[in-house]
Image (cartoon, rainbow, N blue to C red):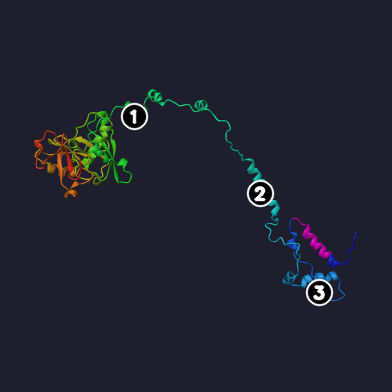
């Protein structure tokens, strides 16, 4: 056993032993500085007869912290103040070993295949057995022609009957999400009595006319296959105010066919057949592949007047294009222009085509 009577050496030994032997690194935060030198002790004030240990302790108590930090530190021991949460950084060797371990694991999942040319040559017979030629002509003859699911569905169901009120389908508000619409409950007075009290809900565009609403009702009526069948012209029907029970209010006249639907606020209306209807005539006009049907009051109208009436029925107004000439043809006589001053009484059929001069039909 060794005995040491120098207190300065004992304090320095304890100081370095804690720093080098503590794995946690916490001692470096408490014992960071070196023991002061004899020169510092001699310069400190105190009695010469005092104990050396007492001098050292008095020096620490009376000396400023900034002066203690000026004491030299060991170059072999590095401060651990930069450690995070008191843990030492991993050494470069440990990091390199871990990287090598990961590389070996990745290499274990990789398979290297060496490509070698085949030394043996195959003859024509062997190649023909490996890749035989197929005769596709027989396969084409045996395989029936394919049909799509749509073609099969069209063959199963017959063609739908034509709806004479198809042109009014564009006023259906159910297909226009952004346009303002109006929902009205329509009672159909031409149905049998047991079905007459059940109204049909119709959603119509607010900017449509009453006559267009009548056409939309007739279009929905025909699509649902209701009986009896309707007349092919909307001029045969009118709309009247009805009660919630479906009873028609006969005291009020029918709605004007030229008024907008948005003008009225009636939630219940009734579709009725006109009792004293005029002998109106139905004219069909095709304008740039768009068909429109409308009623004319008399056969004394000229084709020019009929064209003006048709311009208000289509989605565009051809009167904006008056600078461009047009002519009217018969469906069975394409390319032959009819004089616009001709009257409708001169024709057996009231179906015409309006052709602009700049368009080829």
Label 3 SS: helix
Please rate how many residues cluster around mark 3, counting C-alpha atoms within 10 Å: few if below 14, some from 14 to 19, many from 20.
few
Indicate the quadrant containing the N terminus: top left, top right, bottom left or bottom right. Answer: bottom right
Tell which of 114 and 258 is nearer to you: 114
Residue at label 3? 39
Tell which of 47 and 206 is nearer to you: 47
Q: Earlier in the sequence, mark 3 or mark 1?
A: 3
Residue 142 is left or right of residue 278, and the answer is right
Residue 100 is left or right of residue 12, and the answer is left
Residue at label 1? 151
Structural distance between the alpha carbons of marks 3 and 1: 110 Å
Q: Earlier in the sequence, mark 1 or mark 2?
A: 2
| Residue appearing at x 81%, y 70% in the figure | 56
Q: Earlier in the sequence, mark 3 or mark 2?
A: 3
Where is 52 relative to 164, above or below?
Answer: below
Nearer the viewer's eye, disc 1 or disc 2? 2
| Picture disc at residue 99 | 2
- Please report the bounds of the magenta region as a residue range: 10-23
Please rate how many residues cluster around mark 2, counting C-alpha atoms within 10 Å: few if below 14, some from 14 to 19, many from 20.
few
């Amino acid at each position: 056993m060794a005995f040491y009577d120098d207190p300065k050496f004992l304090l320095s030994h304890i100081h370095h032993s804690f720093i080098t032997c503590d794995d946690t690194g916490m001692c470096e935060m408490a014992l960071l500085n070196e023991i002061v030198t004899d020169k510092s002790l001699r310069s400190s004030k105190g009695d010469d007869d005092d104990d050396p240990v007492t001098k050292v302790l008095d020096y620490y108590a009376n000396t400023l912290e900034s002066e203690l930090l000026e004491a030299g530190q060991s170059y072999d021991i590095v401060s651990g103040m930069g450690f995070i949460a008191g843990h030492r950084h991993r050494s470069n060797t440990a990091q390199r070993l871990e990287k090598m371990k990961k590389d070996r694991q990745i290499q274990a999942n990789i398979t290297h295949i060496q490509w070698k040319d085949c030394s043996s040559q195959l003859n024509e017979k062997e190649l023909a057995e490996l890749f035989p030629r197929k005769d596709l002509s027989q396969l084409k003859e045996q395989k029936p022609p394919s049909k799509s699911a749509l073609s099969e569905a069209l063959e199963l169901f017959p063609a739908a009957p034509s709806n004479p009120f198809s042109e009014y389908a564009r006023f259906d508000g159910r297909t226009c999400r952004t346009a303002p619409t109006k929902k009205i409950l329509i009672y159909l007075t031409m149905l049998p009595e047991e079905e007459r009290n059940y109204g049909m809900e119709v959603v119509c565009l607010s900017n449509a006319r009453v006559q267009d609403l009548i056409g939309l009702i007739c279009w929905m009526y025909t699509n649902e296959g209701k009986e009896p069948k309707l007349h092919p012209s909307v001029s045969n029907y009118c709309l009247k105010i009805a009660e919630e029970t479906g009873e028609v209010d006969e005291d009020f006249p029918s709605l004007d066919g030229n008024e907008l639907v948005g003008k009225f606020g009636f939630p219940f209306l009734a579709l009725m057949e006109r009792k004293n209807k005029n002998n109106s005539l139905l004219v069909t006009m095709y304008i740039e592949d768009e068909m429109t049907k409308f009623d004319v009051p008399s056969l004394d109208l000229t084709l020019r007047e009929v064209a003006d009436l048709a311009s208000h029925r289509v989605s565009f107004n051809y009167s904006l294009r008056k600078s461009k000439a047009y002519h009217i043809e018969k469906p069975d006589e394409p390319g032959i222009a009819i004089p616009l001053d001709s009257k409708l009484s001169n024709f057996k059929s009231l179906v015409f085509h309006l052709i602009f001069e700049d368009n080829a039909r």
